[in-house]
Amino acid sequence: MKLHRLGGLILIVLFVGLGLLLPGWSRFLLTLALARGLLVLGVVLLMQAGLVSFGHGLFFAAGAYAVGFAVRDLGVRDAFLVAILGAGAGLGIALCIGPLLARYRGIFFAMLTLAFSMILYGILVKAYRITGGTDGLRIAPPAFLGWSSPEEHLGSVLYLFTLAATAGMVFLVFQYLRSPLGYTMRAIRDNEVRVEYLGLSVSRALYLAILLVGAMGGLGGALNAMSVGHVDPNLVYWTTSGEFVFVALLGGTGSVFAPLVGSIVFEFLRTYAYKYIPYTWQMGLGLIMLAILGFAPGGLWTLYELIARRMSGWTWSWKRGA
Amino acid sequence: MEQLAIILMDGLVYASWLFLISAGLTLIYGVLRILNLAHGSLYALGAYAAASAVLFYFDRGLWPPGSYVALLGAALIIGIVAGPLIERGLLRWIYGRDPVYQLLATYALFLILEDGMKLVWGVNPYYAYRPYGLLGTVQLGGIPYPGYSILLIGVALLAGGGLSLFIRFTRIGRLVVAIIHDPEISVALGANVSRLFLLTFTLGTILAALGGAFTAPMISVVPGLSVEVIVLAFAVVVIGGLGSLEGSVIGALLVGVVRSLMVHRIPELELFAIYLVMALVLLFRPQGLFAIEEVRRV
């Protein structure tokens, strides 16, 4: 995973510009893509250790419902506070189920996360007095440190807020992956037994990763909920979690930016797919997924790397010729 | 006493259903080492085919009890057509790959089958309830009980019994057991793996379709059936131990009885019964009750 400081800065400027120039509907999509990108980033992070989470909707819904309850029951409307609450809810769930999850690998990990998310789905649907059942909860537009944005600018403000939070998390994850803990994750994927022989605790490393992923997922859920203005149990349905896994695959695991790129491509892909192939949309997803698995296991990021290598190869030969 | 009998009976019926949906999953995992996330779709495929077959059968005005043959026939046809198609078309390319990779591939298959079914059968529900009503109610020690539920138990017993006879007393069945326990040695001794894989997957598909077919008269067949099934089946299989047929029987019985206890005593917790059992088993025996020990490779 590489991150150039200058590149990151340019990207942020680019995104700010894009958000302010694009029409409202695509800015909204971009906001959702960034918020959901945090979840995908979590999936990719766990994939570094060879774990696939099929229950990422768990953290997504935890964060989103935390916002729903905070707005409805506590009367908290501040976006910063609400985002922290969302991250806290994700972290709380990760704290509880992390010790159990960290003991399992491969399909067991995948199916356990799936089972946990289905339990939460069951609770959210059944406890309709508290959660509003399948109708979900409505969320009033947030305020920012006591300042309420005028309605016509709310979309832009939420976009910038989401962008800032996402950029922060991406930077954090980047630092994490460069730290010894981050390297341990990849070592676990290569050979867990040897990591243990080196005197490192595999389960501790995984537990910490799950905590990070949980908090990040909660934050993503909170950001998503604020922009959409509504939460419902579908956020934790396993097809939502499946989508995160799909996007992780689509974007690839080559860089911390890949999940975001995948997420943005996916949001726009979905919008157009709903318009042109509404009934065979999932089938299209499945076929694309098989194609990626078969021909481009690195996802879209392989494309970028291919181009980057071509370009650097070109400058190199040009210098040599001169 | 009477209530205990009902609880046990309900548990048994639910366990039969659970066994039908999980036996195929564990069999396929045991031999192919692939956890088939599309197993629920095969179940739904069986349910849709059976519903169509039953409706078609009654439209012809044929002898009503013959509709059970239609159910069975639909399941067999689905198994024999879809099983080899999926195994040859997709699974054969992913044997021996990273488990994560296999999981994603079968997830893609699930997505494709899901929309494929919508294309063929549409999104409106199918009601094929006539075979359910035909059997009326049976008196069990003074308690009226739906006859169709008894039939379901019979189907599960026949499927389970047939499977264990097949595995114990036929050459191919014994080869299957050999592969489950040690694939490498079996191959070295000359087992034709690719044929056995094809056969096992077809068998597993038939079992899933059978479960779907005999459930169809009890429910309205709608899109989305498959999702719940794969989670439940996996839970049962994990409780019993992945790849173990005896395990799936025990897992199904355990979950079935616990769930029916909860339905009768603490209905609020019904939804979580299966996960509760799973969590408890995993805490004390992470590999499941009957799992085959895996060697840790350094």
Image: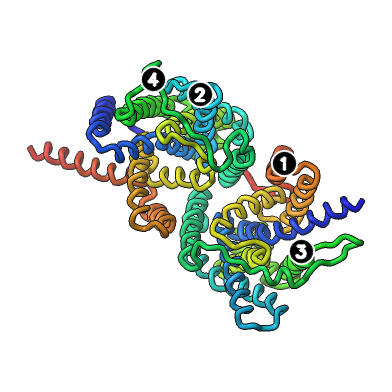
Q: Quadrant of residue B163?
A: bottom right
Nearer the camera: disc 2 or disc 4: 4
Q: Which residue is mark 3?
A: B149
Residue B17 appears left or right of B220: right
Q: Amino acid at mark 3?
A: Ser
The numbered mark 1 sits on a residue in which chain? Answer: B
Q: Secondary structure at mark 3?
A: helix
Badge 2 crowding class, 10 Å Cα cut-off, few under 14, some 14 to 19, many 20 or more, is many
Q: Position of residue A290 (x, y in %)?
A: 42, 56
- Residue at x 41%, y 28% (from the top left corner): A141
- Residue at x 24%, y 42% (from the top left corner): A309
Q: Amino acid at mark 1?
A: Leu
Real-space CA distance between mark 2 and mark 4, rounded to the nearest whole angstrom: 15 Å
Real-space CA distance between mark 1 and mark 2, rounded to the nearest whole angstrom: 28 Å
Same chain for mark 1 and mark 4? The answer is no
Q: Which residue is mark 2?
A: A85
Where the N terminus of chain A falls, by quadrant? top left
Q: Quadrant of residue A322?
A: top left
